[in-house]
Amino acid sequence: MKLKKGDEIKVTRGKDRGKTGKVEEVLPKDNKILVTGVNQYKRHLKARSQGQKSEIVTITKPLPVSNVQLVCPKCHLPTRVKFSLQNDNKLRACKKCDQII
């Protein structure tokens, strides 16, 4: 997967189009990522016991990787990621400015 935890991303599709945030968690099996402050939903929780109150909780759901783009830390533009080999190390690079990420 080309995205890692801590990367800055921009949402390109969906209800949160245009929002940016940091990757909180990467789910490679599902090909999804969890981003802080993006794709949030309300969930109504019923009281389980006598003393507990019912409440509405905001939860963040994972986004498909295909709906986001990495924001390059050097040129600050949404970009695709390419891989380059340097000294037998596979490094990620920005396709727009060719800088190592």
Image (cartoon, rainbow, N blue to C red):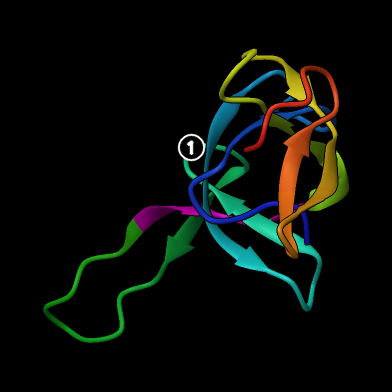
Using the image, determine if residue 78 lies above or below residue 46: above
Residue at x 66%, y 36% (from the top left corner): 100
Where in the figure is residue 38, as x and y percent of width and height?
57, 38
Viewed as shown, does residue 52 lie left or right of 74? left
Residue 27 occupies quadrant:
bottom right
Q: Kindly report the secondary structure that dominates the magenta region of the rendered protein.
A: strand
Residue at x 56%, y 42% (from the top left corner): 7
* The one of 31 and 97 positioned closer to us in this rendering: 97
Which quadrant is the N terminus positioned in?
A: bottom right
* Tag 1: amino acid: Gly
Residue at x 85%, y 28% (from the top left corner): 95
Q: Is residue 49 magenta?
A: no
Using the image, determine if residue 44 lies above or below residue 95: below
* The one of 101 and 14 positioned closer to us in this rendering: 101
Helix, strand or loop at label 1? It is loop
Using the image, determine if residue 27 lies above or below residue 79: below
Where in the figure is residue 76, as x and y percent of width and height?
62, 14
What is the residue that sits farthest to the front in this orientation? 87
* The one of 40 and 20 positioned closer to us in this rendering: 20
* The one of 98 and 23 positioned closer to us in this rendering: 98
Viewed as shown, does residue 48 lie left or right of 66? left
Viewed as shown, does residue 52 lie left or right of 81? left
Identify the residue under disc 1: 37
Which quadrant is the C terminus positioned in?
A: top right
Residue range corresponding to the magenta coloring: 56-64
Residue 25 occupies quadrant:
bottom right
Q: Could you classify mark 1 by the number of other residues whose Cα lies within 10 Å: few (under 14), some (14-19), or many (20 or more)?
A: some
Residue at x 70%, y 18% (from the top left corner): 18
Where in the figure is residue 34, as x and y percent of width and height?
59, 55
Using the image, determine if residue 43 lies above or below residue 16: below
What is the residue that sits farthest to the left in this orientation? 51
